Amino acid sequence: MREVMNVIDNDENYIYLQTTRTQECKSCSMYGGCSMLGGSNELKLKAKKIDRFEVNKGDKVIVELPNVPVVKLSFLAYGLPLIVFLTIVILFYSMNFSDILSFIFGVLGMVVTYLTVNVYDKKKLKDRYLPEIVQKIENHKFIIQENKEISN
């Protein structure tokens, strides 16, 4: 899905974007995640900086929003640690450990799993699901990669 967004800031690695949520948001695969961020009508995202064209604060750009597998990422973040917790608690309880000890080992296993998923997320998935800037809008004209102008 493509969306027009405003550039609100940038640094050496990322461009920070903002837009107002529209009716089309309900058809987006990221809608469930965005709606959990709060009741604000404004959506703020970051995109990886690209070298195709220069964007500055205040520019308007067209952004391609990625199809994010929300269920898969939610399972990695919440489901996997929960499964590890329950497995360890049941395993230790069936080996005649006390309830408290089974619970403590379950929590420790869950924390280790969560930290492992967190490290994996930071290394492997860091920039994978970020929006991509595809065009810069300048004075109601789209600036395309080949520097050709197409009027609106």
Image: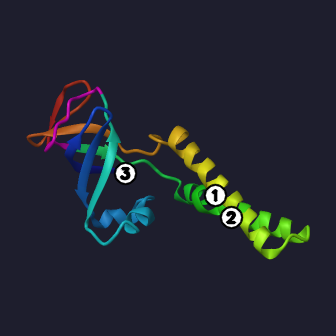
Sequence-wise, the earlier of marks 1 and 3 is: 3
Q: Nearer the viewer, residue 152 or 13?
A: 13
Rendered image quadrant of residue 29:
bottom left
143 above or below 5? Answer: above
Disc count in the image?
3
Q: Secondary structure at mark 3?
A: loop
Q: Position of residue 110 (x, y in %)?
A: 67, 60
Pointer 1 local density, CA inside 10 Å: few below 14, some 14–19, many at least 20: some
**Residue furthest bottom as drawn:** 99
Q: CA distance from mark 3 to mark 2?
A: 40 Å
Q: Nearer the viewer, residue 152 or 116?
A: 116
Q: Secondary structure at mark 2?
A: helix
Sequence-wise, the earlier of marks 3 and 2 is: 3
Tell me the residue that label 3 is attached to. Answer: 1
Q: Is residue 31 left or right of residue 46?
A: right
Q: CA distance from mark 1 to mark 2?
A: 6 Å
Measuring 64% from the left and 57% from the top, which residue is drawn there? 111
52 above or below 142? Answer: above
Tell me the residue that label 1 is attached to. Answer: 111
Tell me the residue that label 2 is attached to. Answer: 107
> Does the stretch in magenta take in 58?
yes
Q: Nearer the viewer, residue 82 or 72?
A: 82
> Does the stretch in magenta take in 85?
no
Looking at the rendering, the stretch of residues picked out in magenta corresponds to: 51-60
Q: Secondary structure at mark 1?
A: helix
Q: Give the residue type that dot 1 points to.
A: Val
Measuring 32% from the left and 63% from the top, which residue is drawn there? 24
